[in-house]
Amino acid sequence: MQWMTLVSAVIGALIATASAALLDRSRWRREQDRPSGVRRALYSDYLTCLSQARNAFRSLARNQETESLERARSTRDSFAPCYGVRYQMSIMAASHVFAASENAFRRLRDVRDLAAAGTPAWNEACSSGRAEYEAALTRLREAMRLDLEADRVPSRRR
């Protein structure tokens, strides 16, 4: 009968060890996903900020009745929030994403300058600036998707 006690104790220890290992693996997975979630939120905030500024510049380029001082103030105010998120990108984003984000930021800044100067939406410089920004934005989104492994086929967790 004593060997049954020993076998029961060994089986109990194996079950406890397996449970602890499964819990540790689960905790490790959650912690691995946390930085990705933070970057995902940051990338989303950055794209939102750029989009809001871009929409404001589009409005200004279409409305030629806005006075130059008001136009300059509006472009500054619309673009200002992008700086804070840009600085966050500089320390949180992967280097290839940050490089793409800087390019998109600079192209949008060019669009801002055209809008502040009163360049109409139908002007060639405005069209060219928008096209360069859109191309840079596409490259930025691709870099973000790559960093977040958005196109990865989910593996079956066991």
Image: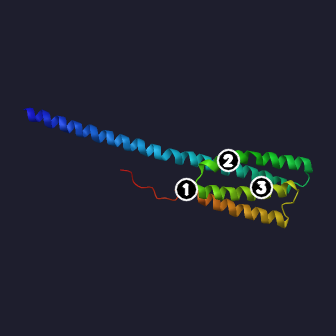
Which disc, if any, is residue 147?
1
**Mark 2 or 1 closer to N-term?**
2
Which mark is nearer the camera, 3 or 2? Answer: 2
Three-letter residue code for mark 3: Arg
- Residue at 79%, 58% (x, y): give it: 111
- Read off the residue under disc 2: 87
Looking at the picture, how far across and down is residue 13, in whole percent?
23, 37
Q: Is residue 62 left or right of residue 98?
A: right
Q: Residues within 10 Å of mark 3 (few under 14, many from 20)?
A: some
- Read off the residue under disc 3: 109
- Residue at 65%, 59% (x, y): give it: 100
Three-letter residue code for mark 2: Tyr
- Residue at 46%, 59% (x, y): give it: 153
In the displayed structure, 18 sits above or below 132; it is: above
Q: Secondary structure at mark 2?
A: helix
Three-letter residue code for mark 1: Asp
**Mark 1 or 3 closer to N-term?**
3
Which disc, if any, is residue 116?
none
Distance between the Cα atoms at labels 2 and 1?
Answer: 18 Å
